[in-house]
Image (cartoon, grey):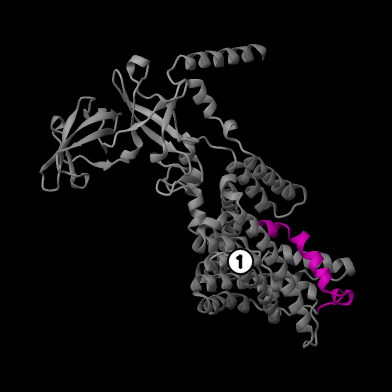
Amino acid sequence: MSHRLIRFVMSFALLALAASALPGQERFALSFTGKTYLKVFRGTADGMTDTTRGELMSAARRTVGSFHVVYLDQFESIVQADLSDGESTDRISAVDIASLNESEVKFTRESSDAYFVIGLGARRGVETGMKGWVYTEVKEGGLFRVLRVSEDQSIAVVTNLEVETRYRDLRTGEFEGYAEQILGGTGFLNLTWGNLVMMVIGLVFIYIAVAKDYEPLLLVPIGFGILLGNIPVPLSMFNSISIYMIDPVTHKFVFNTTGNSVMGILYTLVTNGVFPPLIFLGIGAMTDFTAMLSNPKLVLLGAAAQLGIFATFLGALALGFSAASAAAIGIIGGADGPTAIFLASKLAPSLIGPIAIAAYSYMGMVPIIQPPIMRLLTTKEERLIRMKPARVVRNEEKVIFPIAGFIITTLVAPGAIPLLGMLFFGNLLRETGVTSRLAKTASSALIDICTMLLGLSVGASTTAQVFLVPQSVLIFVLGCLAFAVSTAGGVLFAKAMNLFLKDKINPLIGSAGVSAVPDSARVSEMVGREYDPDNHLLMHAMGPNVAGVIGSAIVAGVFLGLF
């Protein structure tokens, strides 16, 4: 082991020595060329060379200039355009390369602002392909790479810009040695306190899931995703790995649309609202609506528990959020993660991360948040109420319900078709008795895959630089308020119903009107048995619980139609 360590130290020392021999221990000034550059889709494999020249043609096949090669590889070339007097880049329609006998070569116009001249060349040891950093007057501005070298000067291009940096802000540059490139390729140098804070939060999620068994199927993927999203990615590979990218126009962090990042591709399934309907399909295939059908008045408890959504919507408006963002935040009160993500993907894509984390966090903390509210709002006598056994529901009713339920609910809220359509379709697969294979797939493999990838992707979106902002804290606070109000709304409405009912309802099942299936129903059972071990409320609580799933989806559909 000691010999390996010695060899590693010696290798690193040699790299450092080699790096010290490179130019770049001093800053050099940048001089932007102001020239026009094109990327031509022909390279050495097609016969292109450093000395290849060609003509720039207009749409009418008139020569508007010429070009010479600045850089080339096997498949493409970067060329500098030399326009004739009075011509403009807008008139370039084709590239004519006589030496290759080609006059219709495909090309694209490059961001010419990124190309600059360095007053150092081969005499000072500069070589093609060397890399380094460019700087503004006050900070690091990005990375560059040398494309072409002459004796006394070089042409280079900025390959990556730091966030909030523009080409025009760059002033100086510095070459980076091999050892520095190796160190810069690690995450240690870019690790921030924000990243460490988020990693701790991710570990807490995993601990709660594993040690307390709170929503482990959700919190473990989300927790690990938070760790994944907060490993600092060096700027040189940021756009090809991260969920985020630096927008070339706004120079801010935006969702990755390059198509080069695996995590970016996975996250597009979140931002495009693909995962939530598929999860609803699985939920429908797993859900037994018997408890609700046997006692239809319990649907009202599911509706009452949506009170928190509207209260939080108004609160978010008062805090300055836009109406669309406030609607997306308010849906957290339904304690339905997929619905919250679906609505946020349509109304407030930039808020998906904090909304999803808040929604799933409160779903996982149902056994912590709900019991104190339930005890506060009920008396001991109310908690001891025993409800009559539910009536038997015929198979015909179970088959008719998803069809009739879909038609009625989507006529009320057409915006909820993707969610409610999948929910009722999944339930129909379950109840027909002839599609058990499809129901089994939807309720097991499909929902597990979607839940796993959704949780991991959402967790990975919580990069500290994007997530740790006051807006996220506000969303968490509003989410907690929404969940508490929804719980209270269900309990209080059950108490109000008892004023008119002969057969009383145990108000504890009102808290199950939120959509956290089946955890809220289990909490009703747990709190009820604290006061009467033989009083089983689980099946009764499942009625408002599944009604809450439908209710929150309807509200989401209404919001989608409004905003």
Is residue 26 rendered to the left or right of residue 148?
right
Query: In the rendered image, which quarter is residue 35 located in?
Result: top left
Q: Is 464 drawn above or below residue 74 in the view shown?
A: below
Most common secondary structure along the magenta stretch: helix
Q: Nearer the viewer, residue 23 or 3?
A: 23
Q: Secondary structure at mark 1?
A: helix
Q: Is residue 156 magenta?
A: no
Question: Badge 1: few (under 14), some or many (20 or more) residues near its Cα, within 10 Å?
Answer: many
| Residue at 22 percent of width and 36 percent of height | 81
The picture places residue 342, in percent across and down from the top left corner, at 54, 62
Is residue 257 rendered to the left or right of residue 452?
left
Q: Nearer the viewer, residue 285 or 504?
A: 504
State which region is magenta.
360-387
Q: Nearer the viewer, residue 267 or 489?
A: 489
Residue at label 1?
316
Query: In the rendered image, which quarter is residue 325 located in?
Result: bottom right
Could you tell me the amino acid type at mark 1?
Answer: Ala
Q: Is 90 drawn above or below residue 11 in the view shown?
A: below
The picture places residue 117, in percent across and down from the top left corner, at 32, 29
The picture places residue 128, in percent across and down from the top left corner, at 35, 23
The picture places residue 6, in percent across and down from the top left corner, at 62, 12
Is residue 62 rendered to the left or right of residue 498?
left
